[in-house]
Image (cartoon, grey):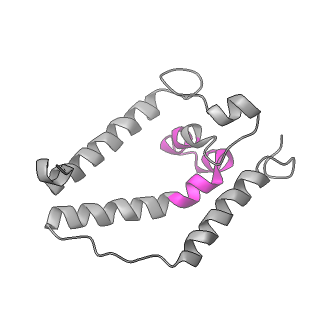
Amino acid sequence: MRLDEIVSRPLQAALVWATLAATAIYLFIFEPGKSGFFLVCPFRALTGFTCPGCGSTRGLHRLLHGDVIAAFELNPLLILSLPFLLFALMRYTNAAVRGRQLTRHPLNPKFIWVLFVVIISFWVFRNTPFYPFPS
């Protein structure tokens, strides 16, 4: 049995937005690394190197407090990808509320490979002692 057979799509979208709102409130109140329930990056704990996601929670905390520069310094890839993630969520919400199917736009495999290379390059570059990622 699929989820959309149990729960209507508008309710699914509302649950996603409610979860995001609750997470944002929690993240606004509690600073990662100092209080609250925040997991440690297993890759960083094992290797001492940062992964592409390291700094995301602290960056979102800073972003929620209006400090875009600090958020960007903690994880630029996350901050640059947020508009695309928000667009995808808005698109899904719009389709769910209107009762329409999401139109599928298959991605060109070249785009997926470029995205993969960008993430891997970011991962490697952020572990070098060069600006803007001092070690």
Residue 36, percent from left and from top: 48, 22
Q: Quadrant of the C terminus?
A: top right
On screen, residue 114 above or below 4? below
Please indicate whether residue 3 sits to the left or right of residue 76 in the image: left
Q: Residue furthest front?
A: 1
Q: Main secondary structure of the magenta part?
A: helix
User: Which residue does the image show at 67% across and 36% down from the upper left?
Assistant: 43
Please indicate whether residue 124 sits to the left or right of residue 91 in the image: right
**What is the span of residues highlighted in magenta in the rendered image?**
59-81
Q: Residue furthest right?
A: 129
On screen, residue 103 above or below 126? below
On screen, residue 51 above or below 43? below
Residue 78 forms part of the magenta stretch: yes
Q: How many marks?
A: 0
User: Which residue does the image show at 63% across and 32% down from the upper left?
Assistant: 42
Residue 5, percent from left and from top: 13, 53
Residue 121, percent from left and from top: 73, 60
Residue 86 forms part of the magenta stretch: no
Depth check, front residue: 73 or 2: 2
